[in-house]
Amino acid sequence: MSRKLGSRGPGVCLSFALLILFVSQSSGVQGALDVNYYITKCPMVETVVRQWLVANVFTDPTGPAALIRLVFHDCAVNGCDGSVLLDSQPGIQSELDSDGNFGIRDIRFIDSIKAAVELVCPGVVSCTDILALAARDCVSLTGGPMITIPLGRKDGRRASNLAADRQLPPADISVPAFLSEFSRMGMSPKEAVAIIGAHTVGVGHCVNVLNRLYPQQDPTLSPMMAGQLITSCPTSNAQLLNNLTILANDLTNFVFDNQYFRDIQAGRGLFTIDSNLGLHPITAPIVNGFALNQADFFQTFSAAFVKMTATGVLLDGQGEVRTNCHRVN
């Protein structure tokens, strides 16, 4: 995107150049993405993505949460490059084979949206941008904030289940490790707590909470919450459990709101990290603040979402626009 400097003196031009250099060094590739990237290449892309998302995703009420989770699982492994969408093929072992991606689903919605976008703008819009836009729209469609994100991501040509094993944070990650993980994406502690607030929609599975129930119950769980989880997950043997059993992330798990933080306060956090955020001296005040002020949560989440989806992206000349989101060209 060009900007006319007019008759400004050389000192101003030098300062502008230094500012651009500073932004590129401090923000990585985020400065190279552009909210107007498709303005001439595919001006209808955001409309098409949203229309097809609305037409498809609500056939499964948990679909929006699944796509929000999907974009995080993409960006957390070697940056936002669409690698989570790749199937296994020569030289590539699908990230979906990682235990950290247990329960990932509804990728078919991305395929449907990609097909619609290809009809309008063939070979122009990356699967990675479609995934980021779809997740962004899932936030607002379920009651969360409308977020403007820059575009221009390209698709990567590699994926690794071993990389996913190493880089996807477990449900029982410690608070310091959690903050360090999101600091790598340029997030402050407040933004890190906001981004995990996406747990306000969606469901979990028994395999991720067994450590809180057996051999001893986690004392940070309220007695009622512990009882509900034991009823749903009555054995410590994960192989005997039905993986179709789902556990609501919070009391309003189809709505993007700040109920997640109120649940933490009441001892109803589903995962170990959820509960621990309400106890750690750095994050507890943030949890309490978001529980009282949904607008602050929405504003902080929006900033964090932009940072997350700009992590480690590939730009023009660094990646490709896949014809099929599941295979490299």
Image (tube, rainbow, N blue to C red):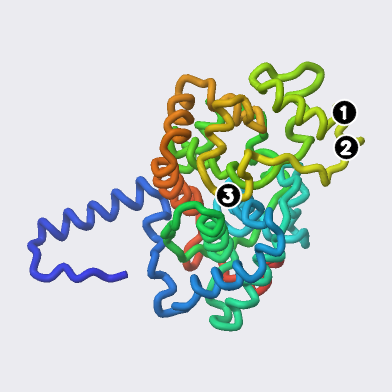
Q: How many marks?
A: 3
Residue 156 occupies quadrant = bottom right
In the image, 161: left or right of 12?
right
Residue 310 appears in the figure = yes
In the image, 166: left or right of 103?
left
State how far apart marks 2 and 1 are (Cα): 7 Å
Task: Indicate which disc, 2 or 1, sits on the residue closer to the N terminus.
Answer: 1
Q: Residues within 10 Å of mark 1 (few under 14, many from 20)?
A: some
Residue 35 occupies quadrant = bottom left
State how far apart marks 2 and 3 are (Cα): 28 Å
CB of mark 2 within 8 Å of CB of mark 1?
yes
Residue occupied by mark 3:
255
Helix, strand or loop under label 2: loop
Q: Nearer the viewer, residue 98 or 48?
A: 48
State how far apart marks 1 and 3 are (Cα): 30 Å
Question: Which amino acid, mark 2?
Answer: Leu
* Vertical position of residue 254 compared to residue 39: above or below: above
* Vertical position of residue 142 compared to residue 220: above or below: below
Residue occupying image coordinates x 76% and y 30%: 228
Question: Which amino acid, mark 3?
Answer: Val
CB of mark 1 within 8 Å of CB of mark 3?
no
Task: Indicate which disc, 2 or 3, sits on the residue closer to the N terminus.
Answer: 2
* Residue 205 spot, x, y in % from top left: 76, 40
Residue occupied by mark 2:
241
Question: Which amino acid, mark 1?
Answer: Thr
Residue occupied by mark 1:
235
CB of mark 2 within 8 Å of CB of mark 3?
no
